[in-house]
Amino acid sequence: MLNVEHCKTRRPQVARVPTREVLLALFACGVGLICLAGCRVDIAGEQRPLIRHERIQGEIELVAEKRIDEQETAGIGRKNDTMEFEERLRLETEGDVYHPDLLAFAAGLGFGLTQHRFDFDGEIDDGTGTLDEYDLSGELLSKKSYPMSFYLDKSEDLIPRQFTSSLKTERQGAGATVSWRSREWPMRFQYSRGRTEQEGQGVRDKDPFSREDERFRYSLDHDFSRSSSLSFDYQRSNVNQKRLGTSFDRTEDTYALSHDLVLGNDEQFRLDSFFNFLDQSGDFDLQRLLWQERMRLKHSDTLETHYDFSFNQSKRPTLRNDEARGEAGFTHRLFQSLVTQGNVYTSKANLGEGVDLTRNGGGLTLDYRKKNRWGTLFGNWSANLLDLQQKGGSTMVSVVDERHPFEVAGSWRIRLDRANVDTSSIAVRSSDRSTTYSDYTVSQSSGMTEIIIIPGDITTDGDQTLSIDYDFFTEPQRDEQAFTHGVRVRERFHNGLSMYYEYRSRAEELSSTDTDIVPDEFEINTFGTDYVKKGLRLLAEYSSEESTRIPSVSTRIEASYLWRINPDTRVTLHASNRWIDYTGQVPYDIQLLTVGTEVSSKLTDKCSIVGNIDYRDEDDTRQGSTRGLQWDAELRYTVRQLSIRFGVEFNHLARLSHETDNTFIYLRLKRLF
């Protein structure tokens, strides 16, 4: 499975407050509430308690978990056996003081005990601990023009891990927001502090980690008229992080200013202006400025044009990048059948160290859709032209947040956009950049870089977009002219059958002082057919790529079926097989088979079961074989205020010389009262 760095935050975190002081403060507040609850006040002639709250609700939760991790590498085996028990009691209520418009609040308090027993290759480690939490939030003067909201919370959780003890995570947070509801100049002030601490529960793997965040934010809005609006935002954040003897401090100041101007009854004219500046210091210094202007003109119901300008400047101690870019384009709609889009652009960048990069280009796209007697015909034609000139010496350029779509049904390979990539700088993250993946391999051929994803957690969310950071080296001199052309045609028949063809090509003229670089030219022909009818889907596709870098021939077949046995039970079956032959200077083949099923059934009004099985078999003549099996099942029982969850998960992964088995069994009981 993929190794993942967990980054779970519910809200900005806070500096740590000693637990004893917090408990004493909560105890004092509780005594005060009890004493004051008996006091009554007269509001609009009606007697009521000074402090009023709803019925206190609570829940008791019991959790038992057992995890077995086994791994064998070159005849050497490891085995970890983990047992954990958790008992939690939570109480919560909500209410108000004097009047709901004065102060409305919600409060919760929880206590828990935990027991664990870890068996690391025969070495026993056991112990007990506590899990405490509280949550207090409220809103003051909600009906006034200056309302205030606040929160104070703490939580403790156990995060299970493979081949090591569970990670105990403690989070504390506090913050407040004050708003000014002005008709002319509405504004908001926000302040928060937070702290997160993590530590392993085993004696030999404490893995201490701590992070402190302090944030202040000010935002302001103003409408000059119905068609002109301004927005300003300032944020300052301080971060301190420590892990395994290393630490860093970082301070960021961000300024953002935007203005929107809209004119015309149908918004025929629109001008959006945006300015953003980041000043960062600490572990590394960075200054980044972004200025954008976007203008849209609606000439008629069928014709629109746009004009964009942007200036981007970033400075680091050893790197600099200044780029100015201008673009103009149009969109034309002919009835409902044909949409034509075109654009031209130019950009000039100063990469530092005397390196200049100039890009000029443009593109044209035609999208066609027409119903006919057999079904619907879809067509697309596109052409793009690029002229690139780079002058000066060699330098390193950092790429941040380059987006790549990842297809679970695809080849599990991602090709980076630039040549001469420093492979040690590659970082693969989820689309929201909150999760970092590390279980992948990297290959380079003819100056191009591919990332090969190993099956694991990343496959569970279906097709998605990955965010990738890396550094690459520029050549001292490079002139490139490239023309990219593509055609797609698909006929979808009324009976569910569809046939399609796609052609893509790229021609390039390249001259560079780097004699090892190879022009990126290719011609790709793809033929395919699919059939969709009720719960059945079938697909067959053949693709041939003639390329100067990584030529290949691939074939894939897929099938899936959704079987609704009854309104409460359904079964999904899916299978696919793909063959890829890479025919370059270092030829290799890949055969990928995936098979799986999912079942969900409501056995009774109180009991249901869900489960799935997925199997993957990949043979790569260069990287070796990868075989994985994953299955899980959960039985759910709910009656009145009692819920029970019993589940089993199993994962098997054999990759290269590693063979890993993971078994996870859990029982969770929750009783509300």
Image: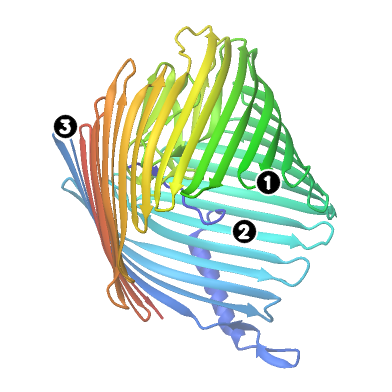
What amino acid type should be assigned to the residue bearing mark 3? Ala
| Of the image marks 3 and 2, the number of the one nearer the N terminus | 3
Residue position for label 1: 235
What numbered label is drawn on residue 564?
A: none
Q: Secondary structure at mark 2?
A: strand
611 with respect to 396 (left or right): left
Work out how far the residue at label 1 is from the one at label 3, CA to CA, in angstroms: 52 Å
Res 67 → quadrant: bottom left
Res 62 → quadrant: bottom left
Residue position for label 3: 74
Closest to the camera, between mark 1 and mark 3, is 3
Q: Residue at x 15, y 47 (%)?
A: 122
Work out how far the residue at label 2 is from the one at label 1, CA to CA, in angstroms: 15 Å
Dots 2 and 1: beta carbons under 8 Å?
A: no
Between 416 and 562, the one lying in front of the other is 562
Work out how far the residue at label 3 is from the one at label 2, CA to CA, in angstroms: 53 Å
497 with respect to 600 (left or right): right
| Residue 196 x %, y % | 48, 51
Dots 3 and 2: beta carbons under 8 Å?
A: no
